[in-house]
Image (cartoon, rainbow, N blue to C red):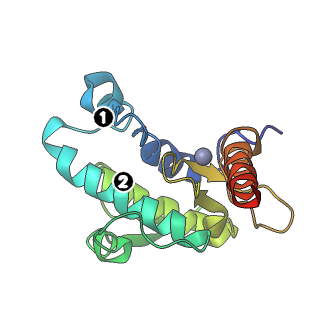
Amino acid sequence: MSERAPAPGSLALIQSLVNTLDVETGADSLDTAEGRARFGLPEDGLPAARELRESLRAALLAHAGHPPHRAVTPLGELLAAAPLVVTVDPADGSAALAPADARPLLPRVAAAVAEALIAGTWTRLKACEAADCHWAYYDRSPAGRGRWCSMQVCGARAKMRRYRANRTEGT
Ligand SMILES: [Zn+2]
């Protein structure tokens, strides 16, 4: 499986939301009607969606042991405003955590975090440590210690920077 393959299950929603912003260029696909439609987001929901996006990014950076990229509202504080309910399927008795109101983005994100928590995948969704990237990626490395969205792109760039720094020191 490619390291750029989307995160599994409910995490794909969170990953695609975090990755609506290109940190390096500042291009934000939520600026377009098409980009907002992907998340069922009304235009007046933009400020809240952007706040949620950066709180998520800070949590994904924390998964990889990094401090927040900037001051954010703690994710837990935002998610506390989105109650989840336990639903039970009468046909087979299976239970799930679902948003009390499934229309807005915030409760859907809260349910996605809960689902990933149950699946044991939440802490594998990380943000790339490169400051000009911070892309959300799913860490598929066996030990779960991946640091970059892509070894070929950001990993290689970090290695190149270290290599140059060492050479400069040596001369
Ligand atoms: Zn990266």
Picture residue at 43% right of the left edge, 39% below the top: 24
Q: Position of residue 19 (x, y in %)?
A: 47, 42
Looking at this rendering, what residue extends furthest in the front direction?
Answer: 171
Quadrant in which the N terminus appears: top right
> For residue 128, which numbered disc appears in the image?
none
Q: CA distance from mark 1 to mark 2?
A: 11 Å
Picture residue at 32% right of the left edge, 58% below the top: 52
Q: Earlier in the sequence, mark 1 or mark 2?
A: 1
Label 1: how many Cα within 10 Å (few below 14, some 14–19, many 20+): many
- Which secondary structure, mark 2? helix
> Image height check: is 121 above or below 44?
below
- Residue situated in front as seen by the camera: 130 or 29: 130
Picture residue at 27% right of the left edge, 50% below the top: 49
**Residue assigned mark 2:** 53
Compared across the picture, whether 81 is left or right of 156 comes to left
> Image height check: is 135 above or below 62?
above
Q: Does residue 93 appear in the picture of this structure?
A: no
Looking at this rendering, what residue extends furthest in the right direction?
Answer: 142
Q: Position of residue 50 (x, y in %)?
A: 28, 50
- Which secondary structure, mark 1? helix
Assess whether mark 2 and mark 1 are in contact (beta carbons under 8 angstroms): yes
**Residue assigned mark 1:** 30
Residue 129 position by quadrant? bottom right
Compared across the picture, whether 25 is left or right of 66 comes to left
> Image height check: is 20 above or below 168?
above
Some atom of ligand 1 lies within 8 Å of the CB belonging to the residue at label 1: no
**Residue type at tag 2:** Arg
Some atom of ligand 1 lies within 8 Å of the CB belonging to the residue at label 2: no
Compared across the picture, whether 143 is left or right of 46 comes to right
Q: Does residue 65 appear in the picture of this structure?
A: yes
**Residue type at tag 1:** Leu
